[in-house]
Amino acid sequence: MVQTKNTTSSAVIKYTTCPLCSSKNIQLTLATTDYSISKDGFEIYACGACDFHFTQNAPSPTSIAPYYQSDVYISHSDTKEGLVNRLYHTARELMLKKKSKLIQKLTTGKRLLDIGSGTGYFLNHMKQHGFKVIGVEIDGDARAATLKNFNIKVNPPPTFLEGQLTEKVDVITLWHVLEHLHDMDGYMQSMHRQLADDGVVLIAVPNHKSYDAQHYGKYWAAYDVPRHLWHFSPKTVAKLADKNGFKVVDQKRLPLDPFYNSLLSEKYQSSKLSLIFGGLIGLISLLVSYVNPSRSTSPIYILKKK
């Protein structure tokens, strides 16, 4: 979301106030690079009032597409070339089962909306487990792949944001999606409208307060600028939820994410022993998260309506 006091060009968005709390007390906290695709430099700003972090001068919705156009951006690609990509696809199969079990513990309802559904693997998995699934995905190629591979028709974002999906759902999921959405408040408000009163929302986002984030600094893979517009912590997720009529009722962890992020971060550092050091830092980060859940690499936040 762009606050009315902020200035926007056709190419980039420059914030003069915090996108979360509207405070003017914002300043540069980290300079980093898009290591995976463009190699362009970007700045991350922090709010002195609420501690929300965001990518400053990020591409606007009409100019960000080139930053996604690469086979290395594997959440929207089926490439298995390279060690990290092969590990990602193996981990995806394991995590589909974990996500399904978690959802079935949280609700007996069978109507599911997945925002940022990518190439449809999660939708198809839940469909096979008896759920009536609805997908929302901005990428036309990903929507086409979902239809071709799984016979599931996925909606473009305007269909959701403009209220054209009229059926209430029991669960809404965003797996590493919220940090990509320019209009985060608009999505949160549309989710509130779409969700049944006793429904649940599951949001997984990277946590810049995690051990691996602190260890790798500007090389931390989950900063993923400029595709990641927002950089969350448990505190700021709770504030965003409260602002839009939700409350965070529980928090889980994605246990494989610290390893994936650490391996990729080692690659960005040009480490010669990335597999060894990435595995070690990933393990330390996972263990730290069990002692202090607020430092989990990628928490799953479970929200309900207030």
Image (cartoon, rainbow, N blue to C red):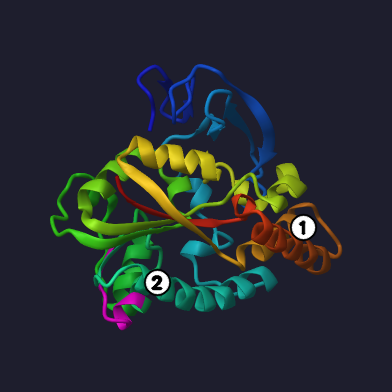
Q: Kindly check if marks 2 and 1 are in contact, taking CB atoms under 8 A apart as contact.
A: no
Q: Which residue is mark 2?
A: 122
Disc 2 on helix, strand or loop?
helix
Tag shown at residue 279: none
Q: Is residue 90 left or right of residue 122?
A: right
Q: Image height check: is 299 above or below 90?
A: above
Instruction: Please tell me whether residue 82 belongs to the stretch shown in magenta.
Output: no
Three-letter amino acid code at the position of disc 1: Glu
Structural crowding at the residue carrying mark 1, measured as other residues with C-alpha within 10 Å and reported as few (<14), some (14–19) or many (≥20): many
Which residue does the image show at 72% across and 42% down from the upper left?
218
Q: Residue visible at 77% across and 57% down?
A: 266
Q: Residues in magenta?
A: 126-135
Name the spot of residue 170 as percent of width and height, x first: 25, 63
Residue located beneath label 1 in the image: 266
Q: Position of residue 233 (x, y in %)?
A: 56, 43
Q: Position of residue 112 (x, y in %)?
A: 28, 66
